[in-house]
Amino acid sequence: MPLPILLATALGCAGTAEAPEEPAPTEAPVEAPPEAPAPAAEPGQKVDLNTATADELRAIPGVGDRMVHEFEEYRPYVSIQQFRREIGKYVDAQTVAGYEEHVYVPVDPDASDAATLQQLPGIDAAEAEALVAGRPYASRDAFLQALADKATPEEIARGQAMLATP
């Protein structure tokens, strides 16, 4: 037996005198940079549950991908009570109330229930019932005039964005 083969056999190499290959060094996996958080709405400004993007919903404290899916699954929302009922299947009432600090169901002056009207800034239960009793409103402006007796000009200005588009 030639000497190189004899040495390879003695060293336990399979028919060759070459040195065994060394494993390639492993590199640490490169992590993607963390995603920037979704921009939050301005303080006091809520997002429309029927049109909010997934990023806008994720910006709500405690809302992750699963809850974004649940929020989107029940669209369109016609009342805040519907939102409470549907999302209440997944989280407790306190969590739902926390979400409501950041979201709203669009208000239809002639169709929304009293609970949905109470989403408007400055409107309490009695005022919401009075708004319901004053229906139908001849126009959006007529509804806003009825609000003027119940809320400050600043509250009305914020609430206008919450009205359903005609």
Image: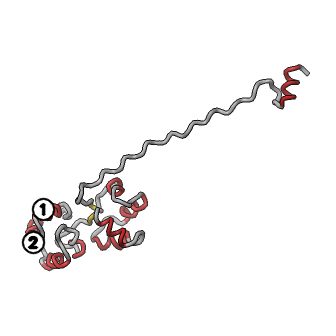
Q: Where is residue 68 in the image (x, y as percent from the top left)?
A: 38, 60
Q: Residues within 10 Å of mark 1 (few under 14, many from 20)?
A: few
Q: Choose between 105 and 101: the one closer to the eye.
A: 101
Residue located at (49% from left, 42% from top): 31
For residue 46, above or below residue 118: above
Q: In which quarter of the image is residue 9?
A: top right
Which residue type does callout 1 highlight? Answer: Glu
Residue located at (64% from left, 32% from top): 24
Q: Position of residue 155 (x, y in %)?
A: 15, 64
Is 105 situated left or right of 138 in this image?
right
Label 2, secondary structure: give it. Answer: helix
Query: For the residues carrying marks 2 and 1, which lies nearer the camera in this image?
Result: 1
Q: Choose between 145 and 136: the one closer to the eye.
A: 145
Where, quadrant-wise, is the C terminus in this rendering?
bottom left
Which residue type does callout 2 highlight? Answer: Ala
Q: Which residue lies furthest to the right in this view?
A: 1
Label 1, secondary structure: give it. Answer: helix
Is 57 situated left or right of 147 in this image?
right
User: What colouring method underlies this structural image?
Assistant: secondary structure
For residue 41, above or below residue 108: above
Where, quadrant-wise, is the N terminus in this rendering?
top right
Q: Quadrant of residue 48?
A: bottom left
Residue where numbered disc 2 is placed = 146
Q: Where is residue 142 in the image (x, y as percent from the top left)?
A: 8, 69
Is 35 situated left or right of 79 in this image?
right
Q: Quadrant of residue 136?
A: bottom left
How far apart in space, not on screen, are marks 2 and 1 (Cα)?
A: 15 Å
Between discs 2 and 1, the one toward the N terminus: 2
Residue located at (18% from left, 67% from top): 121
Q: Residue 154, which numbered label?
A: 1
